[in-house]
Image: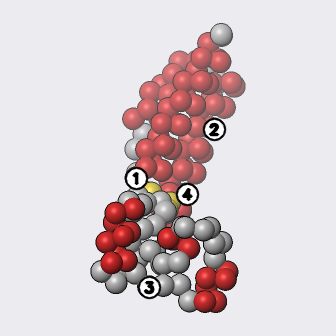
């Protein structure tokens, strides 16, 4: 591995870590109910039964309680806030590309300085 390859891989790893942290920060955690939690919600009458029209549209699986009852108020999938995430991710990628260009086309000492600066670059 030559110096340029090493520098490119290093800056790419830094960018990947930053993007992963960013994604974690702007992702709303999902919630999944256990079977016991579902049972308690049904027993207590807290979840409605799907309408006939909705039931026909929903992919029915025999013995799957989620096909019959609506649990959306109590469980949901993880969601990424793209409005906040995308501009910040784009800034990271833009800086990554600028550093990659410097590594390939510019001075090695200046490129190393940019990598160090990028490592501490606060994208949030």
Q: Could you give the CA–CA distance between mark 2 and mark 3, rounded to whole angstroms? A: 51 Å
Q: Position of residue 123 (x, y in %)?
A: 44, 47
First in sequence: mark 4 or mark 2?
Answer: 4
At 50% from the left and 32% from the top, the residue drawn is 14
Given the current orientation, which residue lies at the most extreme top position?
Answer: 1
Nearest to viewer (mark 4 / mark 1): 1
Q: Could you give the CA–CA distance between mark 1 and mark 3, rounded to whole angstroms? A: 33 Å
Disc sitting over residue 48 in the figure? 3
Front-lying residue, 112 or 59: 59
First in sequence: mark 2 or mark 3?
Answer: 3
Nearest to viewer (mark 2 / mark 1): 1
First in sequence: mark 1 or mark 3?
Answer: 1
Marks 2 & 1, CB-CB < 8 Å contact: no
Q: Position of residue 71 (x, y in %)?
A: 44, 74
On screen, residue 42 versus residue 78, left or right, reads left
On screen, residue 101 versus residue 12, left or right, reads right
- The N terminus sits in image quarter: top right
Front-lying residue, 123 or 43: 43
Disc sitting over residue 86 in the figure? 4
Q: Which residue is mark 2?
A: 97
Q: Is residue 114 visible?
A: no
Marks 4 & 1, CB-CB < 8 Å contact: no
């Amino acid at each position: 591995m030559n110096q340029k390859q090493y520098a490119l891989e290093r800056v790419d790893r830094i960018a990947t870590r930053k993007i992963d942290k960013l994604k974690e920060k702007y992702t709303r955690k999902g919630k999944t109910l256990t079977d016991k939690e579902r049972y308690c919600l049904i027993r207590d009458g807290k979840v409605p039964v799907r309408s006939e029209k909705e039931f026909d549209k929903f992919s029915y699986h025999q013995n799957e309680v989620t096909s019959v009852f609506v649990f959306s108020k109590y469980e949901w999938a993880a969601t990424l806030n793209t409005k906040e995430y995308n501009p910040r991710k784009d800034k990271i990628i833009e800086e990554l590309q600028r550093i990659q260009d410097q590594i390939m086309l510019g001075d090695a000492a200046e490129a190393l300085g940019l990598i160090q600066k990028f490592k501490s670059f606060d994208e949030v």
